[in-house]
Image (tube, grey):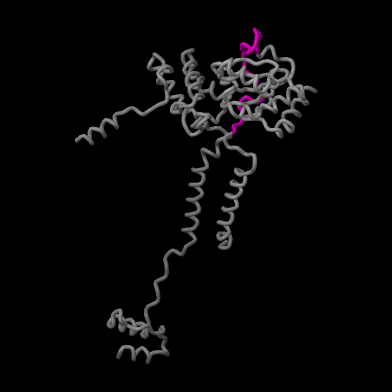
Amino acid sequence: MRALLLVLLLLLAPRAFAVEPSERLADPALEARARSITAELRCLVCQNESVDESGADLAHDIRVLVRDRLKAGDTNAQARQAVVDRYGQFVLLRPRVEPATYVLWFAPVALLVVGFGATVVWLRGRPASIAAPSPLDDAERTRLDAMLREDASLPAVPVPTRDSQPALAQDGEA
Amino acid sequence: MRRLIYLLPVLLFGVLAGYFALALRPGYDPQTLPSAMIDKPAPDFDLAALQGDAKLSRDGLIGKPIVVNFFASWCVPCRIEHPLLMRLSQQEHIPLYGIDYKDKPEDAQRLLTQLGDPYRLIGMDREGHVGLDFGVYGVPETYVIDKTGRIRKRFVGPLSAEQVDQELLPLLRQLSAS
């Protein structure tokens, strides 16, 4: 019961962000907008964290910059652009779709299409059905019967041909 | 056709090896980012100087090519490049200006007393606003600004003697000549 309670409480706990109380804006709507922007900006000091999550000093500065811009009446796009102007496209965790990023955005789809095409070509190139194996001849059938009778105790013998028929008969008697 | 398929893994290996060779080449640091500010006007700034009542401002520096170095007393790599900065100012007579990034004046003063002061003037960027406007993401960073106030080159991290001799000084010569 206690364990369950703990799990529930942990699930309810808000995700930890690095945003400090002093940075928060009084207006919750504006603060939410600021959050949505900084969550998609890369911190340049610890390059795999977002500005929203990072404890680095620079991330703090960028959070304050974004909030200042929003307070001054910027739209989300303008506030984002203010950061891109300083640090370049690299700060965007979600790169823009433009000629320089076409490879990034469309390569997965292109590879999928190429793979699909290659599969179709390969399947077309195969014979429609695999020919049925030729039926057993008499020698093979006799040997198979012998095997089935003797079960797994059959000693290893050379693969019989029509010429080795007597050897097979001997095996059967043994 | 069959034969070509057997060559495919070799081809793939070649492509991968090419990527690795590019990423492992000496001197390449994936953490170094291209500056968004190259060839753009330097951001406006107007900072109180470390010593005296002077001001270090963008407008006051326009008219000749200059070098602006962001540093701080708490920054260890800054100490590594410090002898080079001394050489730049004393032997090459480069117009070198400092911006003291998120630092206390007394700490900066102590550093300069210890190691020497290579700067013509030092502006105090105590809150780091100017650094933010320049797109600084770690000190030291060094910017070459031409006489019209445009940023022409950015060096991230401590300057090396090779960078100074092969990039910074030739660029300054070219900017001074034009």
Question: In the picture, which quadrant includes the C terminus of chain A?
Answer: bottom left
**Residue sitting at x 61%, y 11%:** B48
Residue A78 to residue A120: above or below? above
Q: Nearer the viewer, residue A63 or A22?
A: A22
In the rendered image, is residue B178 in sight? no
Q: Quadrant of residue B24?
A: top right
The stretch in magenta equals B32-56
**Residue sitting at x 65%, y 12%:** B57
Answer left or right for A144 relative to A36: left
Residue B3 to residue A33: above or below? below
- Magenta stretch, main secondary structure, is loop
Residue B137 to residue A119: above or below? above
In the current view of this chain or complex, which residue is farthest to the top?
A: B53
Question: In the picture, which quadrant includes the N terminus of chain A?
Answer: top left
Residue A120 to residue B101: above or below? below
Q: Is B37 inside the magenta-drawn segment?
A: yes
User: Percent x, y for residue B45?
Assistant: 62, 14
Q: Is B63 inside the magenta-drawn segment?
A: no
User: Percent x, y for residue A134?
Assistant: 40, 76
In the rendered image, is residue A78 in sight? yes
In the current view of this chain or complex, which residue is farthest to the right?
A: B177
